[in-house]
Image (spheres, rainbow, N blue to C red):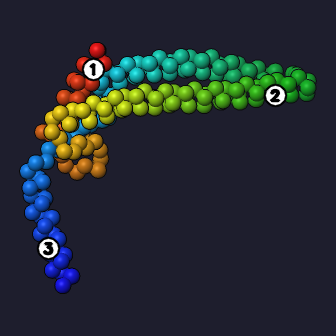
Amino acid sequence: MKLKIVLLFFAGLLIAGTSFAADTKIGYVDMQRAINTSEAGKEAKEQLAARLKKAQDEINVKQDELKRLKDELEKQGVLLSENARSAKEKDYQLKLKEFQRFTKDAQDELQAKDEEYTRKILESMEKLIQDYSRKNGYTIIFIRNESMIFADEKADITDELLKLFNASRKK
């Protein structure tokens, strides 16, 4: 009895699936490519690169100062009194901690900015994808990722969405 019910259930799914498949329109978007090649993505990369250069310049200055202090400590260490050497070592250790803190803060800030820019682009893209999908009769739009074993390139709507996304930003 249970076997009949299960067979009838699967037969019903097969029949329903066949009619559903005829009306189904599926597409996918390569979001990584969309983010990287969109005008907004390129602008974000430029802004991040400028921030990175500024931070790197500051890091280089602080690194040079640390190197200078360490060299002084090594050269003058034997000539200095115990108190003077101890004070220079403390100064060096303090500046080293400040440098490490600054470096970590700079990395955290860059990562946060990158995430902020990406989030803004993704939010705009999601809205655009939803509108595009409704207007063009799509049933499902997937995000291209490594779990997709195969996806026909005809279903890739990334380029169309990029054109619309870039045009919408100019308005």
Q: Which mark is residue 90?
A: 2
Q: Position of residue 167 (x, y in %)?
A: 25, 19
Q: Nearer the viewer, residue 47 or 49?
A: 47
Q: Nearer the viewer, residue 18 or 46?
A: 18
Q: Nearer the viewer, residue 37 or 137?
A: 137
Left or right: 39 as drawn, with respect to 21? right
Query: Which image quadrant for residue 76?
Result: top right
Q: Amino acid at mark 2?
A: Lys
**Quadrant into which the C terminus falls:** top left
Q: Are marks 2 and 1 in contact (CB under 8 Å)?
A: no
Q: Position of residue 20 (x, y in %)?
A: 12, 54
Left or right: 88 as drawn, with respect to 25? right
Rendered residue at 16%/69% (across/down): 10
Q: Which mark is residue 168?
A: 1
**Could you say whether the residue bearing mark 3 is in a helix, strand or loop?**
helix
Q: Amino acid at mark 1?
A: Ser
Q: Are marks 1 and 3 in contact (CB under 8 Å)?
A: no
Q: What residue does disc 3 label?
A: 8
- Mark 3 Cα-neighbour bin, 10 Å: few <14, some 14–19, many ≥20: few
Rendered residue at 21%/36% (across/down): 133
Q: Which mark is residue 118?
A: none
Alpha-carbon span between mark 2 and mark 1: 57 Å
Alpha-carbon span between mark 2 and mark 3: 81 Å
Q: Is residue 71 visible?
A: no
Tell me which label, 1 or 3, sits earlier in the chain. Answer: 3
| Vertical comparison of 144 with 11: above or below | above
